[in-house]
Image: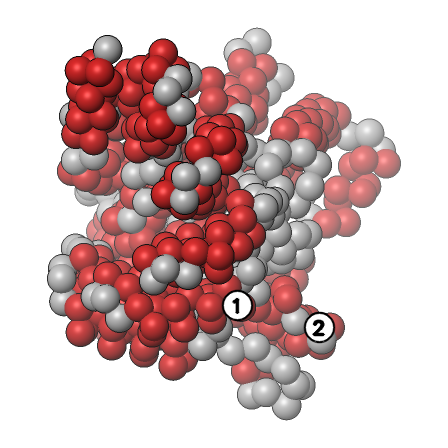
Amino acid sequence: SRAIKTNQDLLPETPWIHIFYNDFWGTLLTHSGSHKSYRPLCTLSFRINHAVGGMDPWGYHLVNVLLHAAVTGLFTNFSRILFGDGYWTLIAGLLFASHPIHTEAVAGIVGRADIGACLFFLLSLMCYMKHCSTRGSSPSTWGWILGAGLCAGCSMLWKEQGVTVLAISAVYDIFVFHRLKMHQIISALYKRKNLTLFFSIGLLTSWGTALLGVRLYWMGNKPPSFSNSDNPAADSDSFLTRTLTFFYLPTKNLWLLLCPDTLSFDWSMDAVPLLKAVSDWRNLHTVAFYAGLLLLAYFSLKGSSNERECNGKTVMNGKQNANGHSCHPEMEYKTLEVKSSFASKEENGLKKHEIQKLQLPSTENIVILSLSLLIVPFIPATNLFFYVGFVIAERVLYVPSMGFCLLVTVGVRALYVKAQKRFLKNLVFCSTAALIVFYGLKTVVRNGDWQNEEMLYRSGIKVNPAKAWGNLGNVLKSQSKISEAESAYRNALYYRSNMADMLYNLGLLLQENSRFSEALHYYKLAIGSRPTLASAYLNTGIILMNQGKTEEARRTFVKCSEIPDENLKDPHAHKSSVTSCLYNLGKLFHEQGHYEEALTVYKEAIQKMPRQFAPQSLYNMMGEAYMRMSRLPEAEHWYVESLRSKSDHIPAHLTYGKLLALT
């Protein structure tokens, strides 16, 4: 709703330049309550969607699917550079295309930020790869690195993690293109070898630093602030709890990539219970995860194995094997002429007797690049440098999933090579095909959950019952299923009793069904949980005013009008509630015959009124106050303003008609 439905930056009357000053939700980026999510290119794409098709969701979904298709094509092309033409490239592409973790990013409209960032991420990486291959031999090489830098900037303007492509490019250049080991990097730097390599890395570093510096400056040099429910671990007073939980969360994310059996639209609140003690058995998962990661990285960087694979062929010490392949692990790319036999047809997916030119990195090189793709884009979500506003977010795994798909593919290829018997080779191949099929089926099932809000929220009850029941209550209420909606709200409060939004929503439901005393009770609980919830003050004041408790209502409205919008997630909605409070306070004074005080309050309301507030009733009441004070020209002005803002506002037609009859 906030990113599209109520985002003023999508409307044609809003200057498009505002997109570059506001966050993803339309709040000024320097505002204390801003989420600091700066994604102007994504918001711009929403605005184009809005200009073409308004609020029809079909066009928004079409763009998301087309972007995912483009990313899949680019990723498959990128995999071809690593695995060559054949089955392994196809497997990598199919894994990415079918992975269920992508459902949220593609089926959820706001997930477009991740898809767009991934698109330019790949474009930047491939431009840099082209720069590497033409470096020192063609003047166009600097055009390619310029393209890589521009695409990296665009990727960051789609979503923040896009800037990490510059680090991936550096890893590719050092460990894949030049095939250097860790000890060789220091040696090459000391002996001033490969100066062009270090010059390119220097450019990447400088550009990345500049992008991050400008990004930090643009958001006001302050990190965002989040509520306890968004990221409970970050709000914990215990250093041990924070450390154990933050170390465990990447393990949970990897499990979602490996076995996406349980998926949810929201993993905040208590969806992942905090790890409060070393004795928590989940710490074993953490230890196993990091140990495996470190071992994999160590052996890949060490690269001491004598036996290597070259696109599905076993090679000893770089010598040609029986199938006519050669692999030169310690040298830069060599053009390898491959004449495929029947075996190479099976293992590489090549036509019989076809001659190909392969420029393929070794398995160790691919593993290093895959680990980098898996880890580096995920680092911004780890709470390492700053706290984030979520516990787990499936859409955040869209870019890292590329590294996962490459790791699975290179692992399957290694197993295929090691298998000596044809039965074992077929078993590996069939198991991989089954994995792709199961991923695809799970994606289809998960898409069913995203068909409508009710199905989506029901699917999330087992993961995050408090949030899911609360959102489900809103849906059921919109369907006029009042008793079911009330039950859903109460279920949400059973799991988390201090949710101000749920307390307010339940109070609103009760108020609309004339259960005023119960509604007041829940509004007071909501205010107690969140003293800045202006809408709860507003409805409390309205009930009190209708019950004749004018003095109590007046105090409630005044207190609401004094609440600042600092550090609030949605300052626009807050300002609307404050304006409505002032409007009702003015009506209260008006009914008591205090017209001067009413006018003072109305003028304050106009000053605080946000752009999206519908002002016709406020303007009409201004005219009424002037009318009662016999200041007819001012009254006529405000009646006309009311009709200008909403031409079919009946009360303004009636009051303006009375004025015209009088004059």
Most distant residue in the bottom direction: 279
- The label on residue 237 is 2
Give the image location of residue 312, x and y in percent.
38, 54
In the drawing, does residue 281 fall left or right of residue 474? right
Residue located 38% across and 81% down the image: 494
Residue located 66% across and 52% down the image: 386
Give the image location of residue 470, x and y in percent.
33, 67
Give the image location of residue 145, x and y in percent.
56, 21
- In the rendered structure, which amino acid carries the disc numbered 2? Asp
**Dot 1 corresponds to which residue?**
529
Whichever of callouts 2 and 1 sits on the residue coming sooner in the sequence is 2
- In the rendered structure, which amino acid carries the disc numbered 1? Ser
Circle 2 or circle 1, nearest the eye: 1
| Residue 196 picture quarter | top right
- The label on residue 449 is none
Element under disc 1? helix
Residue located 66% across and 76% down the image: 241
| 579 vs 111, nearest the viewer | 579
| 151 vs 564, nearest the viewer | 564
In the drawing, does residue 99 fall left or right of residue 541? left
Image height check: is 357 above or below 524?
Answer: above
Give the image location of residue 73, x and y in percent.
29, 37
Most distant residue in the left direction: 480
Residue located 57% across and 48% down the image: 563
